[in-house]
Structure formats: structure tokens, C-alpha cells
Image (cartoon, rainbow, N blue to C red):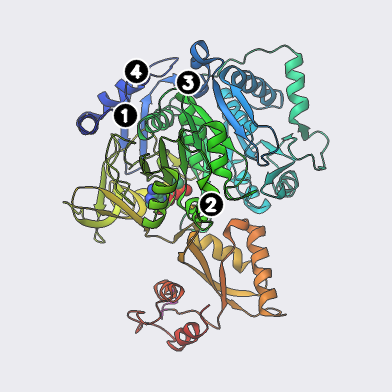
């Protein structure tokens, strides 16, 4: 068997889960034996959730890239590691074998070193979905630098905030990106971002779109030139730097309920074991299969299930540069047919968007290679689940509904494809090592089945976050202080009569828009930056395609040309401060917001109004000015 720790049956799942709870250290130590280490651990797990302090595989030494590349060279040097499908179907796709990936990663590792990178440095990567993005990520890991990938849709301000928070000294970017029929600038965004980032000494620029870019003498250099220099020097491999198990591997910024995004930190060994273990078990990956995860590497899903999970399993991972609806809504299906994709992992929002085009774009495509389907990022609705099952899987492919978070590093609750039962709209059962609990408002555990509550974890798992970069206290207050000795996910959850879990959505002030996390406080701050805005309140409302849409209530007393113009202005501000992904779907101008006497905005009321439920606003007696609610109701969009 390719993966000795691959769960093979429902009984085996129960046995493994049991074992992982009874003796976690023995359980994880056995699994970790199947990886490449420079030195083994002295202790499998040390932990307490009060600081919090979590250490897995203490004193072990390793480099994750040896596990993702070098160890596959003897058996798979000429097997495809990465298949890349460009945005434009008329451009040729590329395949990188494990050997080619090795050469490129080693070469770029040397480029980084030539540009002053050292172990422990933070390197920001702001790139399109091209193989060089994966190469840059792995090259950082090779030299022991900490990568911070920032999604290409974020604005200069957002990139700047993230670079400053992590004090990055190098940025790897591209001239621009292709996305559908658009060409998006990246280097100009970096130039703007860096005005406030004195820590950055070097910018390495890949040529992707060929658009003109300004290059600053001494700071900026081209990827191609730097690689050529190294190639000409005859470098054939770059020795992987030995990392401590608990050294940081990467930082990934994510939104929370406070105004500022936080840098979630993952470390080398635990994350590697977890990304690999979950990949192999949830998707039931078999060597030779083609795995297509449609996420962007700017998000955790891309980190774990395009890069680290698949490559550490010697898999073939498919990277797609474009969007599902361009040149037409059959793009995913063309890719499945062209590359004989076996596993497709995507988000409910993509499924719903493709659903809206009907079945014509899918009917004449050969999807017979598909064996496993997956979904992630938000609760999937019943209709989308069945469409996925009927029209994509032809009722012949198990669907894995995978619940997890940036903070969890990998999948936490999910059925295992074809091995444990699926249930539409349920993530079903916890993976081995995962001990979920449901908690009521008073902080008590709700036992038994057929119940609901706030989802927490009572025991550490190897892939969990270790800290939030530069601010450990924030990590503690955000995740470990709501309930004593528990990790709080921020999600609400149902446990049905059979013990299956269904995640119902966030219970904090975080929206999930098209699978992207958007903090309402962060968005309100951005809107309030507009000079004419006095105050704003953001809530989510059900949206057919995005899952949640963004509804903004805005008090405006600036220069008012006309309503449409002012809305555009506000949208521009949001795009500038955060990025286009956070633009509100609806903006309603109001003369006041419903507040309590102590000045707190009653979001519950705004949420109801945004949802269209204006009759059942609940208790409004604590409101300072009830008349404002009538006004808001009347002018609802
Ligand atoms: C939500 C993405 C229901 C959830 C991997 C979580 C889900 C947040 C599911 C994390 C699912 C993710 N069913 N909800 N299968 N998967 N979520 O950090 O609210 O971008 O807290 O990680 O997405 O989003 P993040």
C-alpha cells in the first residue's frame, strides 16, 4: 500500500479514531515514522491551552521540501508533480515532473539566498496562479524562510499592512496576472504598498503578462534573469536547511472579528504531517491520480491541498490560473476532460455559480475520469450538493464535505471518500485526532446527539495554529479564552442523532462571502475611511451564489452628487483599503443606526432587516431611538 496509514473501511476509521484518542502520542508517532527526518523527536506532544502552548514532535529536525520533492525522486522523478492549466485555454498547459520541480525549487532557493534571504526571514509572495508561485513557496521552505502568501486580489494597503506586520525583507511578485478576460496589475500594487515598507530590500518580479513595469535600481530584479544566473553557475541542487519541528513554516493572514487581520502561524512538522494525513485519507488518494483543487494558493486551501498535502504524498496536483466562468461556464469541465482529473475539490460558491448556467455547459463533456468530489469553505446548500452529485459526479463519486479553517491547517471534520458515509450538507465525522465538542452559551459542554451549540476542540492536533504572528496574546484571546481549556472555532454546529456534524456558519462578526472570510469590523473601518462617511454597520444576508452577501448601512454626510455616485465612491474606497472581494453588494444610506442606550449597534436588528424579515425584529425596547428602525425598514433595498 502506498500509504500505510490510509484508512480503508468504516470499522477501520472507528478503530483509528479510538486509538488516536486513547493514545495520541503513540498514534501520531507511528504516522510520523513515514516521513523523512534529519532527526527524530524526543517527545510527541507537549501542550496546554491556557497560554496556549502546543509543541508536536519536539526536537525533531526536518525540511518539508525533502518530504515534498526529494523523497519522490528515486521512484517518481519523471512523474508529473504539477500540471498547470493557464487562464486562456489557447495557451499551452505545462507539466513539471518531480525532477523538474526539484531543479526549479533548488534554483530559486539559490536566487533567494543571492538576494540576501536567510533562515527565519519573512518573504511575501504576491503572485498569480502559475507554477512559479508553488516554486517560490517551496524555495522559501527549502532555505527555512517563512512565506507569507498574499492573495492577488488584495489592495496595496492590505499588502502593505501584511508586509509591515511580518517585517518581510523580500517580496516575490509578477508584472501582472490574467484573470478571465482581464489583466490585473501586480507589480504596480507592490510599488504602492512598499512606500510604507522600509523592511523590504528586494523585489523579485516574474514576467507573466508582459505589461510594462517600473523597476527600481538596486531593489527590483527579474525572476528570469536571477534564475539564469544561477543556472549558468551550474547549480544542480540546493541542500535543504534543517529545520526544527516547531520552527515557523508560514504565516497566512486571515480576517477575524476585530479590525486588523491576523497572521496565523503554522510550523514545520505538525503541519506537514496533518496536511499529508488529511489529504491521503479524506480524498483517499491513490498514486497516479490527478488531483484538482480549484482554490487559489493565496488561501489556506491552496497551501494545504494544492501544495503541501499532495506533494508530500507524491501526488499529481493541478493548478489552474483562471476562473470557472471564462471563456465560458464549461471551463472546469474542459479541464477535467483534458487532464483526466480524478479528484475535484472546489467551493459551494463555484458550484452555485456554475449551476446558474444550467447543464448545457456540462452535458457534452467527458467527466468519466472523476472519482471523488470535494467541497470546502462554507456550508453547502442541499440544492448545490445534489447538482454536484447528479451532474458532475453522475451519482457515481463520493462527495467529501470538508470542514476546516486557516487556523486548523487541514481538514478537521469530513467523510472519507467511499470509506465513511456521506450525508448531504453534513461534514459528518471528525478525523482521527480530532475531538470536537459543542458548548452552550454558559460554556457548558452539550453531550449526546441531536443537539447544537458552538463548535470547540478539546485536544490539540498536529496542524493547529501555534500563534498569531507577533502577538501571542491575541491568539489566546481570540481562540482560547472564550471557553476555558478549549479551542473555539467561531462556528455554530449541529450534531445529529447519529453523531454527524453539520456546520451552520459563523457565530461571530465574520462573514463568509464566496468562501472568503471578511471581518465586519475590518470592512466598517474601510468604509469609514471615506471622507463623507460618518458611521457604518455591516451585516451578511443570504445570497444565491455567494452564500452570504454584504449589506452596508451607511450614515453619509459628505458631498452628495447622487446616490449611485456615492455608492461607487464607497466601493472604490473598499477596493483601495481591502480589495474588490470586500465590496458591499448593497449599500443603504440611513440617518442613524439602531443603538442601545449604551451606544452599541444592535446588529441583530440590522441582520433581520437585511434578510428581509422586517416583522420579527425581536425585543427593541432597549433601543435609544426606535423611529430609526422604521426608517431603515422603509428604505430597505
Ligand atoms: C467555513 C477555509 C461549512 C467555516 C478552509 C469556517 C465551512 C470558515 C466549511 C473557515 C464546510 C469551511 N462547511 N462551513 N465544509 N469549510 N467553512 O479560514 O465558517 O478561509 O470557520 O478556511 O469557513 O474559513 P477559512
Q: Which numbered disc, 3 or 4, marks the residue closer to the eye?
A: 4
Q: Which residue is drawn at 37% across and 30% down?
A: 284
Position of 603 relative to 148 (above/below): below
> What is the number of the mark on residue 27?
none
Q: Residue at x 66, y 53 (%)?
A: 157
Badges 2 and 4: C-beta atoms under 8 Å apart?
Answer: no
- Residue in front for this viewpoint, 251 or 36: 36
Q: Which residue corresponds to mark 2?
A: 360
Q: Which numbered disc, 1 or 2, marks the residue closer to the eye?
A: 2
- Among the 4 quarters of the image, the one containing residue 99: top right
- Residue in front for this viewpoint, 360 or 147: 360
Q: Which residue corresponds to mark 4?
A: 1
Q: Distance between the residues labelled 3 and 4?
A: 18 Å
The rendered magenta stretch, by its main secondary structure, is classed as loop
Q: How far apart are marks 3 and 1 (CA)?
A: 21 Å
Query: Which comes before the other along the chain, label 3 or label 2?
Result: 3
Query: Which comes before the other along the chain, label 1 or label 2?
Result: 1
Label 4: few (<14), some (14–19) or many (≥20) C-alpha neighbours in 10 Å: few
Q: Which residue corresponds to mark 1?
A: 45
Mark 3 residue CB less than 8 A from any atom of ligand 1:
no
- Provide residue 552's location: percent of width, then percent of height: 54, 70
Badges 1 and 4: C-beta atoms under 8 Å apart?
Answer: no
Query: Which comes before the other along the chain, label 1 or label 4?
Result: 4
Query: Which comes before the other along the chain, label 3 or label 1?
Result: 1
Amino acid at each position: 500500500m502506498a500509504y500505510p496509514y490510509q484508512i480503508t473501511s468504516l470499522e477501520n476509521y472507528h478503530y483509528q479514531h479510538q486509538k488516536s484518542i486513547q493514545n495520541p502520542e503513540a498514534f501520531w508517532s507511528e504516522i510520523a515514522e513515514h516521513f523523512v527526518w534529519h532527526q527524530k523527536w524526543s517527545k510527541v506532544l507537549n501542550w496546554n491551552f491556557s497560554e496556549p502552548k502546543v509543541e508536536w514532535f519536539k526536537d525533531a529536525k526536518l525540511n518539508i521540501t525533502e518530504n515534498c520533492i526529494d523523497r519522490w525522486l528515486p521512484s517518481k522523478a519523471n512523474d508529473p508533480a504539477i500540471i498547470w492549466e493557464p487562464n486562456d485555454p489557447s495557451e499551452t498547459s505545462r507539466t513539471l515532473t518531480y525532477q523538474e520541480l526539484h531543479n526549479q525549487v533548488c534554483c530559486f532557493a539559490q536566487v533567494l539566498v543571492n538576494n540576501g534571504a536567510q533562515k527565519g526571514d519573512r518573504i511575501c509572495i504576491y503572485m498569480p496562479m502559475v507554477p512559479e508561485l508553488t516554486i517560490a513557496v517551496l524555495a522559501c521552505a527549502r532555505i527555512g524562510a517563512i512565506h507569507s502568501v498574499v492573495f492577488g486580489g488584495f489592495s496595496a494597503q492590505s499588502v502593505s499592512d501584511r508586509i509591515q506586520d511580518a517585517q518581510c525583507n523580500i517580496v516575490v511578485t509578477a508584472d501582472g496576472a490574467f484573470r478571465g478576460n482581464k489583466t490585473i496589475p501586480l507589480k504596480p500594487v507592490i510599488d504602492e504598498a512598499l512606500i510604507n515598507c522600509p523592511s523590504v530590500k528586494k523585489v523579485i518580479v516574474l514576467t507573466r503578462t508582459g505589461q510594462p513595469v517600473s523597476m527600481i535600481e538596486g531593489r527590483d530584479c527579474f525572476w528570469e534573469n536571477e534564475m539564469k544566473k544561477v543556472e549558468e553557475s551550474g547549480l544542480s541542487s540546493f541542500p535543504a536547511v534543517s529545520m526544527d519541528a516547531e520552527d515557523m513554516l508560514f504565516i497566512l493572514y486571515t480576517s477575524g472579528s476585530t479590525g486588523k487581520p491576523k497572521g496565523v502561524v503554522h510550523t514545520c512538522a505538525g503541519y506537514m504531517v496533518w496536511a499529508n494525513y488529511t489529504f491521503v485519507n479524506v480524498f483517499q488518494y491513490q498514486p497516479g491520480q490527478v488531483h484538482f483543487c480549484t482554490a487559489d494558493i493565496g488561501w489556506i486551501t491552496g497551501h494545504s491541498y494544492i501544495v503541501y498535502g499532495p506533494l508530500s504524498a507524491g501526488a499529481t496536483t493541478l493548478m489552474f490560473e483562471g476562473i470557472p466562468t471564462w471563456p465560458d461556464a464549461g471551463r472546469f469541465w474542459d479541464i477535467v476532460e483534458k487532464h483526466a482529473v480524478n479528484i475535484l475539490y472546489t467551493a459551494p460558491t463555484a458550484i452555485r455559480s456554475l449551476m446558474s448556467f444550467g447543464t448545457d455547459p456540462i452535458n457534452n463533456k467527458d467527466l468519466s475520469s472523476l472519482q471523488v468530489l470535494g467541497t470546502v469553505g462554507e456550508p453547502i446548500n442541499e440544492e448545490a450538493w445534489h447538482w454536484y452529485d447528479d451532474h458532475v459526479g453522475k451519482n457515481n463519486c463520493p462527495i467529501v464535505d470538508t470542514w476546516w479553517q486557516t487556523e486548523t491547517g487541514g481538514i478537521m471534520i469530513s467523510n472519507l471518500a467511499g470509506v465513511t458515509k456521506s450525508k448531504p450538507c453534513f461534514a459528518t465525522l471528525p478525523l482521527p485526532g480530532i475531538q470536537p465538542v459543542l458548548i452552550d452559551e454558559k460554556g457548558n459542554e452539550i453531550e449526546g446527539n441531536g443537539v447544537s451549540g458552538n463548535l470547540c476542540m478539546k485536544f490539540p492536533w498536529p496542524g493547529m495554529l501555534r500563534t498569531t504572528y507577533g502577538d501571542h496574546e491575541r491568539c489566546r484571546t481570540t481562540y482560547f479564552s472564550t471557553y476555558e481549556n478549549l479551542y473555539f472555532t467561531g462556528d455554530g454546529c449541529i450534531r445529529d442523532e447519529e453523531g454527524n456534524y453539520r456546520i451552520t456558519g459563523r457565530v461571530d462578526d465574520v462573514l463568509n462571502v464566496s468562501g472568503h472570510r471578511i471581518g465586519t469590523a475590518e470592512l466598517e473601518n474601510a468604509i469609514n475611511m471615506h471622507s463623507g462617511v460618518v458611521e457604518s454597520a455591516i451585516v451578511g444576508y443570504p445570497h444565491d451564489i455567494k452564500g452570504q452577501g454584504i449589506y452596508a448601512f451607511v450614515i453619509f454626510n459628505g458631498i452628495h452628487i447622487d446616490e449611485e455616485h456615492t455608492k461607487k465612491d464607497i466601493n472604490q474606497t473598499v477596493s483601495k483599503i481591502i480589495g474588490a472581494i470586500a465590496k458591499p453588494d448593497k449599500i443603504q444610506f440611513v440617518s442613524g443606526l439602531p443603538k442601545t442606550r449604551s451606544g452599541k449597534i444592535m446588529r441583530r436588528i440590522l441582520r433581520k432587516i437585511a434578510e428581509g424579515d422586517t416583522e420579527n425584529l425581536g425585543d427593541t425596547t432597549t433601543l435609544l431611538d426606535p423611529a430609526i428602525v422604521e426608517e431603515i425598514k422603509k428604505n430597505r433595498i
